[in-house]
Amino acid sequence: MFHNTCGRKGRFARTIGMALAVSITMSGCSTISDWFADEEEIEIRRLKPIEAKFSPTLAWERDIGDGVDHYFSRLRPVYAYNKLYAADRHGAVVAMEPETGKVLWEKDFAQFRSESMMSAVTKLWRSGETARIGGISVADRHVFIGTENGYIAAMDAETGELAWDATVPGEILAAPAADEGILVVNTGAGSLFGFNTRTGEEVWRHEGDTPPLTLRGISGPIASNGGVIVGTPIGKIQVNLIETGVLAWETVIATPSGATELERIVDIDTTPVLFGGTVYTVSYNGTLAAVELRSGRVIWKREYASFRNLNIDGNKIFVVDNNSNVYALDRRNGVELWSQGLLKKRSLTAATPVGDHIVVGDNWGFLHWIEQETGEVVARLDVGGDDEDDAIFAAPLKVDDSVVAVTRNGVVASVQVPN
């Protein structure tokens, strides 16, 4: 099931496409797939020329299953305990050596060889049926997954052995979070759950509100300083006490406006960022805000719209908006430092800080390096192919001196940059 290769699916198709291309220029490649695209899409695909300052290289790549296909997903590898953990939507969960991609253990939540191996929960997924994994996280020496079926599983991080499992009413579309021995799970039904990380016992639950129409996604919770911070589909940031689930405070970030339910969508589907006692968040309808953790007081607001996670490095906060424009702002006051529109409409991932750069992936399998100081695109690498099956859909992950990306067709790739 798992293959480590430098000639995987998609490479052959891309090679043929390049051979038949009308032209190959510095501005990008025209391929056979361009013949079936309209002019606007061709223009978006055609990369603008850059002055490359270094050349990233592919260290290894590994096929970990079926990927996420064309479904909405925020599945992203996790690096912890000197291992790289990854999952595909269908049910494969693997632990790998980050240096080589070698699989250390693997577990499949979608296929079972005998009825005796099935618990009451796993009987829901007969052999070959998808588990629909929506999020993966690592904490307290365990690997946790949540699925769209409302299933939660905890595995030993060293061996992959199943420690416990549980179910909740509602879809899990974001990675759980853990702190102080409590695993926190957010659901599409607007409810938060707290579980004992060691036993799986449900400790508490908090019921929330959901509007008539929301985006296909939920906010990933973060757990820190005795609290759980999460965005809501009604445009609020809320903090719950991690021991009891009791609501400590909630603050309105985005207010619904407009005549239709579509216009009134104010979802905060991003995972909040906690930095120096301040919570940063952004809503789909156009509000970026900094909020004081202790009180919930809004420190500043700016007009940026995004469903992608924010990232912070030093005093800079990086935003990729709904149209794939990239921005850097001063996190202290929200003042815009630079904007980069060269990759507009390429369905960029969130931006990951890596050294003096940020790295984003796009819908055609490219990674792009952008200078933190200037916003200039200074390097790129094709780690996917020429169609959306090879799209990089989740933010790249920094692992020591490498960058790890995952594509929609289930390939995990590790990329190195020369020193």
Image: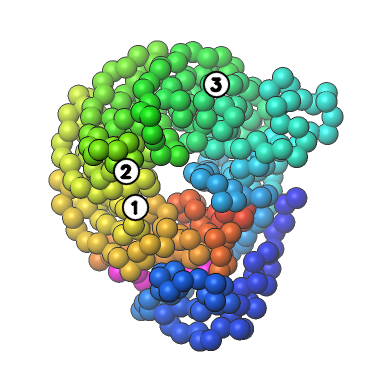
Cβ atoms under marks 2 and 1 closer than 8 Å = yes
Q: Which residue: 42% across, 35% down?
A: 218
User: Residue 337: x percent and y percent?
Assistant: 19, 58
Q: Which mark is residue 168?
A: 3
Which of the two marks, 3 or 2, is nearer to us in this view?
A: 2
Q: Is residue 389 above or below residue 118?
A: below
321 vs 3, left or right, is: left
| Residue for badge 1 | 322
Question: Quadrant location of the C terminus?
Answer: bottom left
| Residue 284, numbered label | 2
Q: Residue at x 62, y 55 (%)?
A: 409
Q: Main secondary structure of the magenta part?
A: strand
The kind of residue tagged 2 is: Tyr
Going from N to C along the chain, the mark reached first, 1 or 3, is: 3
Measured from the top left, where is residue 290 in percent x and y?
21, 38
Q: To which quarter of the image does residue 86 belong?
A: top right
Q: Alpha-carbon neighbours of circle 1 within 10 Å: few (<14), some, or many (≥20)?
A: some
Q: Nearer the viewer, residue 225 or 326?
A: 326
Say what secondary structure mark 1 lies in. loop
How is the structure coloured here? Answer: rainbow
Instruction: Report, in whole angstroms, how far the alpha carbon at label 2 lies from the one at label 1.
Output: 8 Å
Query: What amino acid type is highlighted by mark number 1?
Result: Asn
Q: Residues within 10 Å of mark 3 (few under 14, many from 20)?
A: many
Where does the magenta region start and end? 376-382
